[in-house]
Amino acid sequence: MSEIVAYAIPIFTLLLCAEFAWGWHVRRNNYRLGDTLSSLSQGLLSQLVGLCTQFLTIGIYTLVQSRIALVHADAFWGSWAGIVLATIAYDFLDYWLHRAGHRSALFWAAHVVHHQSDRFNLSTALRQPSTGVFLGWIFYLPMAVAGVPPVVFVGVGLIDLLYQFWIHTELVGRLGWFDRVFASPSNHRVHHGINDRYLDRNYGGILILWDRLFGTFEPEVETPVFGVRGGLATFDPIGANLSYYATMADLCRRAVDWRTSSGCGSRRRAGFRPT
């Protein structure tokens, strides 16, 4: 997967430059040098960590698939029908991982990195956490139990990841019927907004249907304000990745009993100060 992402970097770079140029042309430039460099450095750090931890995500998945799979049907999963079904299954499980990333303090501590920028552009898509790999793989094990081969799992995971690149932009407006079925720039702007009505909404990676089905959908009806409540005072990628873990440690230190130490990871309730 990391090799394919490396091949995609020139395309990402070209699209970043195109978005910046068009935004400048229409006087809607939303790039800031320090923020963009921070997003890119966090994406690079995430890829480096991913290279070192592939045994965790792919290794454990392969072990479960080979030992516990209910059925082995590699020929089916390698067909177009199997790939489409596996992509839908991956996107469904990714919805629940993403939702946990906002509802659980432990998962939010990793996922918050992706939301720290107060700008919303294609570089934000590359702003990926480095610590999510240590627990996120758990959510995808049902695919291993169902017998989806590791190569198909990796492939559809890459499809899901690459799709989400283009929806991080303010320069694409509402898209009619497309917004009702798929994750889109409009839907994803809502997800990154810290407006009260937008908090913890629109988790879908490819399909927004999951949000409609499970009651987490919110349409874009007001201009989103991006970032996290309380902001982030550093562009340092390591500091950004560790920032909420430090907040969690402080919350636990000040907790009076175990009930108040098990806080939620939601941006509404996770200890972030209102902007």
Image: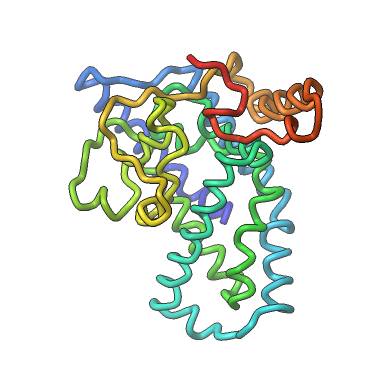
| Residue 148 location, quadrant | bottom right
Q: Residue at x 28, y 35 (%)?
A: 220
Q: Position of residue 172 (x, y in %)?
A: 25, 36
Color encoding of the figure: rainbow
User: Residue 51, can we see it?
Assistant: no
Residue at (42%, 50%) from the top-left corner? Answer: 204
**Percent of width and height locating residue 207:** 37, 55
Nearer the observer, 156 or 271:
271
* 107 left or right, relative to 55: left
Badge count? 0
Q: x, y (%) of residue 20?
A: 32, 26
| 123 and 272: which is toward the camera | 272
Identified at 69% across, 50% down, the residue is 135
**Residue closest to the eye, 102 or 44:** 102
Q: Is residue 22 left or right of residue 128?
A: left
Residue at 35% over, 21% down: 30
Q: Is residue 101 above or below residue 139?
A: above
Q: Position of residue 219 (x, y in %)?
A: 29, 39
Quadrant position of residue 267: top right
**Image quadrant where one finds the N terminus:** bottom right
| Residue 202 visible to the viewer | yes
